[in-house]
Image (cartoon, rainbow, N blue to C red):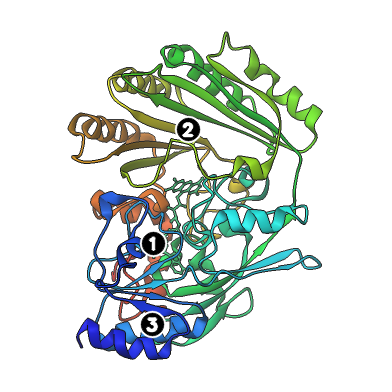
Amino acid sequence: MKAGQVAATLSSQLEGEVLQPTDARFEDAAAIFNREFQHQPALIARCKTTRDVVNTVRAATGAGLPLTVRSGGHAHGGHSVGADALVADLRGLDSLELDEAAMTVTVGGGVNALALIEHLYDRGLATVTGFDPRVGVSGLTLGGGYGLLSRMHGMACDQLLSAEVVLADGSVVVASANEHPELLWALKGAGANFGVVTRLTLAVRPLPELYGGVISYHASRSDELLPRYAELVAGGLPDSTTVYVGIDTSPDEISSLSLIAFHLGDLEEGARVLAPLTSWGRPLAGAFDEFDLLALHQPGGDTFPEGFKHSWRSHFLPSFESSTVATLVGAIEEARAFPSWTVIEHMGGAIGALDGAATAFPHRRAAFGVVSALKWESDPPAEPLAWQERLWRELAPASLGSYVNYASDKHGPQAIRAAYGANLPRLIELKRRYDPFRVFCGNITIPAA
Ligand SMILES: Cc1cc2nc3c(=O)[nH]c(=O)nc-3n(C[C@H](O)[C@H](O)[C@H](O)COP(=O)(O)OP(=O)(O)OC[C@H]3O[C@@H](n4cnc5c(N)ncnc54)[C@H](O)[C@@H]3O)c2cc1C
């Protein structure tokens, strides 16, 4: 069936609407964060209800159109808006229902991090989200999801108690500890492969007091500061403390190494735990203080602006060895000739309290994530991309795998094993059971065998 015919039929069935490429709003609606993987879809179904999603799934399968599912649109690989696909745009599924007695919140499949944080903040509550307010709660949670609260409360997927899912045949099921528990397991880390999640029920936590901030040093001191960081973390920080390192290089400005540190809980305790980080020599800028969760998650900042093309590469590492430090120091030195952003994400704590087989997200032994991020506007920058690939390869021998939420198809079939690790055989079985005709392939797709 032609896309125009599908649009006409589907429009009459939706509470939302169907956009065609001729519609003036189409380009904006199709736009995703990573313009490197910006595709031109056939149609966009702006869904408002679960029934809209059911009709959209049936329209795609009935017409033989590829189907992709879009929430916040921040998938690194641009998976949510497929070429020539019918896109199920979930942004109209924006409900938020807090159950304070049960300490849960149920969110629609299109809610983004900022809406969720704001909703909970007013009630003195919080849950695990990432750092960027624009990212979709679904996409982040279904791929694992870590952020400020993770070392204390686990991954975002660990907060997922149940989910309403539209399967490939248009049936609607609830995945929970009692119903379809295997599906719930699979959604916690490989969730884009099984159906459209229209509602997610997440555990919420008391909003903690927060102490910390960012202190930046000259990147030329990396050879001295990174070993200190490794020593600090190896010494054992409490689960309430998270210390990321962000390395920003630029040929035009001073390249910096920043300690991005957070303590959840008592402010005096936070000041005490983070005090050692304030005496690493004269900083370029920054200080630690009490801060506010909502203020931290406001849109803005120039690290990840809209409208750019991006290349990200990631590794999960079990420890921060001297060889890792040496590799990073060398890479930072080379990268001072061009703009780059490398972040060392501090994991462990409650993330590692579960076994790797407890959820589809397998990388529970990771103590760190290393992510290198490049962005550009027009032609791909050859030298930085070669640098990024080299860094990724040099860190690979120590790697446990890569983060599905930072992967793209450009990374080849090895991205599948790197993302799902030892859980892959079980995921292959579940893919056969829940998506036998392989409708949900707009992601790092679980193979048929
Ligand atoms: C600037 C930036 C900052 C980030 N920071 C963090 C961070 O701090 N922590 C972290 O863990 N990650 C972070 N990420 C990664 C982020 O978690 C992933 O990019 C995530 O997949 C984005 O989700 P989304 O809903 O915005 O994207 P989308 O592109 O809409 O969706 C992502 C994938 O999930 C699928 N999907 C989305 N919703 C559903 C649904 N309801 N049902 C079924 N499938 C669905 C899509 O088809 C797609 O394959 C960041 C990404 C960016 C670009």
In the figure, 287 relative to 436: above or below? above
The residue at which mark 2 appears reads as 344
Q: What element carries label 1?
A: helix
Depth check: give the residue in front, 13 or 226.
Answer: 13
What amino acid is found at the position of numbered circle 1 in the picture? Leu
Q: Residue at x 38, y 65 (%)?
A: 425
Q: Residue at x 49, y 86 (%)?
A: 51
Label 2 crowding class (10 Å Cα cut-off): few <14, some 14-19, many 20+?
Answer: many
Q: Position of residue 184 (x, y in %)?
A: 54, 70
Mark 3 or 2: the one toward you: 3
Q: Is residue 172 above or below residue 143?
A: below
Residue farthest toward the top in the current orientation of the protein:
281
Amino acid type shown at disc 2 = Ile
Give whichever of 132, 417 is nearer the camera: 132
Q: Mark 3 points at which residue?
A: 56
Q: Do the residues labelled 1 and 3 touch (CB within 8 Å)?
A: no
| Closer to us: 21 or 189 | 21
Q: Which of the two discs, 1 and 3, labels the residue nearer the N terminus?
A: 3
Q: Which amino acid does label 3 sit on?
A: Thr
**Image quarter in which the N terminus is found:** bottom left
**Other residues around mark 3 within 10 Å, as few (<14) / some (14–19) / many (≥20):** many
What is the quadrant of the C terminus in the image? bottom left
Which numbered disc, 3 or 2, marks the residue that appears first in the sequence?
A: 3
Q: Where is residue 281 in the image (x, y as percent from the top left)?
A: 58, 8
Mark number displayed over residue 192: none
Instruction: Name the mark nearer the viewer: 1 or 3.
Output: 3
